[in-house]
Image (spheres, rainbow, N blue to C red):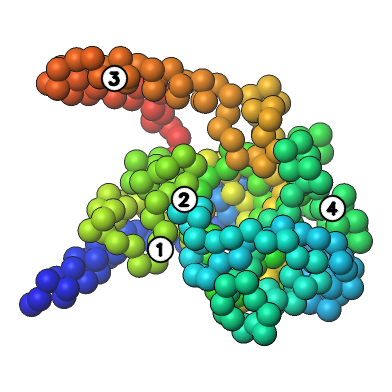
Amino acid sequence: MGEKELEIEHQEVAMERQPVIPLAQYTGVTREFFLQEIYPLRKPVVLRGIDLGPCTAKWTVDYLIQAAGKKEVKVHVAAEPQMDFLSKNFVYRTLPFDVFVKRAAEAKHTEYFISEDEKYYLRSLGDDPRKDIADLRKQFPLLGDDIWIPEYFDKEKLFSTVFRISSAGLQLWTHYDVMDNFLIQVTGRKQVVLYSPRDAPYLYLSGTKSEVLDVDRPDFKRYPLFAKARRYECLLEAGDVLFIPALWFHNVTSEEFGVGVNVFWKHLPSECYDKTDTYGNKDLAAASRAVQILDRALKTLEELPEEYKDFYGRRMVLHIQKKTYSTNYE
């Protein structure tokens, strides 16, 4: 057997060792049931049969083009279907909304920036992204009344409503957010792969994002620990709502052109969050301070000889585990 065949066999065996866990699904969930039976478990679930308003029927390509018209939007344009935020294998371009929707719904383009089969992705922003939070009703007022947000959290805790549109086949990088959120799949279908916060050591993190781009065919030779991560997954159909608790990693692939809305809310007191965060993805203020302190401590260890640095580094790891790891959290 050649080297290439051995590598393929190794990846297949490793993939077999990676558990695949389907998400729990509930139909017709009330606010009370969600808050009492689902929310305290801190695990993602798919909610079906929720009345989302007329959006599921109205938000066709033609309707979106007419409703939002020539409003300019900043979009991601990628030649590759797997978008990588770390290497930035995409470009940002500004287009009138109607032109963007038309292109995002196409498989091949007569007009394009990179290639005729390039992919498009919109993540709506505030009017001034440095200061303003995404609000569907403000940025797209003619669409805001079409969707009914599930009132499964206190209204005063609402942070943002993010409008998302993706080309068919587009895959977003694996990342986590610091707020709870609902991913409302209005039209189209999405495959969502999730990983528990406890599996962070196996995801090869760079900030809030994983370096493992292809979660379906991962390079286990480069990322061997990834085989230990427990893979949760679901297929979102139009009208489904996915509850994603804070810190759960998620990777999203649009199986067809689709429209979604993310609803983020603050499940912790407001003072816990970074006041400059308009996206809802900056680490909590206390966590950022702790990382800065840890970085200074690690820099101090650089003054020691190798064997001492190794020894005290391991002691620090044990100390962190003893002080912070929970035996109850899943």
Asked if disc 4 and disc 1 are in contact, CB closer than 8 Å, the reply is no
Q: Please state which of the two labelled residues, at mark 1 or mark 2, is closer to the viewer.
A: 2
For marks 4 and 3 on the same chain, the one whose residue lies earlier in the sequence: 4
Q: Nearer the viewer, residue 119 or 174?
A: 119
Kind of residue sitting beneath label 3? Met
What residue is shown with label 2? 86
Is 93 above or below relative to 129? Answer: below
Secondary structure at badge 4 equals: helix
* Quadrant in the rendering for residue 167: bottom right
Foreground mark, 2 or 4, reads 2
The reply to whether dot 1 and dot 3 touch (C-beta < 8 Å) is no
SS assignment at label 1: loop
The answer, for residue 26, to whether it is visible in the render is no
Residue hosting label 4: 139
* Residue that numbered label 1 is attached to: 214
Determine crowd level at label 1: few under 14, some 14-19, many 20+ residues with C-alpha closer than 10 A.
some
Identify the residue at image location x=67%, y=85%: 110
Give the label, 3 or 2, closer to the camera: 2
